[in-house]
Image (spheres, rainbow, N blue to C red):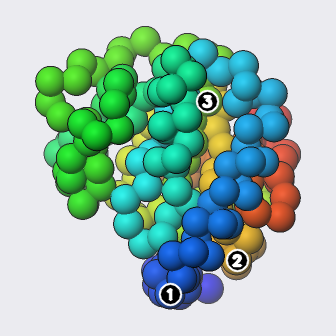
Amino acid sequence: MNKEELRRQLLEKRRAMLPGDADSLSAAILGRLKTLEVFQDAPQILTYVSSKDNEVDTCVLIRELLAAGRVVLVPKASSSGIMEWRRLEDLEMLMPGRFDIFEPPEHCPAVTTISPAALCLAPGIAFSTDGYRIGYGGGYFDRFLAGFSGSAVGLAYEFQITDDFQSQPHDRPVQWIITEERVIRCAEALGR
């Protein structure tokens, strides 16, 4: 199946989820995430902010991390197609930015040094079991992951896992995918 058709079908399915179902499945996914040693030990957590289309909800996790004094970095998309990571101090400071995604305001300084032990939580509309993902099509996360030396984890509902698409040369895999049912170790990405 081509990526556009798969993106359309899975977005439709995600948008059709009942809010209570999305909340309970997100809670199960985040519960599995918290058991990973790479999550527990990460000096920085780089995460998307769930904003639309019933994405796996990261807002509860971000609140917990901030309350625990962990370093949380969230992306701000630039018009040049690059994501800048900015340290978040309070979830309430976020505002809608490009693509209706919640972002930190301009006065939050960009973080230029990201630890090689950092963990990045990557969103996606579809994930293959070897770690490749289909996002919204802007390529922001792929460009970032191409130069990222830390670990990346895709957060997805089980129905978003499919091997019905081919990765492209510019695509970058995540090392793990976590769903409400399992933790998938992506061999291709772990071997790099």
Q: How many marks?
A: 3
Q: Secondary structure at mark 3?
A: strand
Q: Residue 188 placed where, x, y %?
A: 79, 45
**Residue placed at 52% from the left, 17% from the top?**
69
**Residue placed at 36% from the left, 15% from the top?**
112
Amino acid, disc 1 = Ala
In the image, taking residue 151 as reference, residue 59 lies left or right, namely left
Q: Residue 21 placed where, x, y %?
A: 62, 76
CA distance separating discs 1 and 2: 13 Å
CA distance separating discs 2 and 3: 24 Å
> Between 88 and 67, which is closer to the camera in this rendering?
67
In the image, taking residue 43 as reference, residue 111 lies left or right, namely left
Mark 3 Cα-neighbour bin, 10 Å: few <14, some 14–19, many ≥20: many
Q: Residue 101 placed where, x, y %?
A: 30, 55
In front of the other: label 1 or label 2? Answer: 1
> Between 19 and 167, which is closer to the camera in this rendering?
19
The dot on residue 50 is none
Q: Secondary structure at mark 2?
A: helix
Q: Secondary structure at mark 1?
A: loop
Which residue in the structure is indicated by mark 3? 119
Which residue in the structure is indicated by mark 1? 16
In the image, taking residue 49 as reference, residue 21 lies left or right, namely right
Q: Is residue 106 above or below residue 51?
A: above
Q: Quadrant of the C terminus?
A: top right
Mark 2 Cα-neighbour bin, 10 Å: few <14, some 14–19, many ≥20: some
The dot on residue 159 is 2
Amino acid, disc 3 = Leu
Q: Quadrant of the N terminus?
A: bottom right
**Which numbered disc flags the more N-terminal residue, 1 or 2?**
1
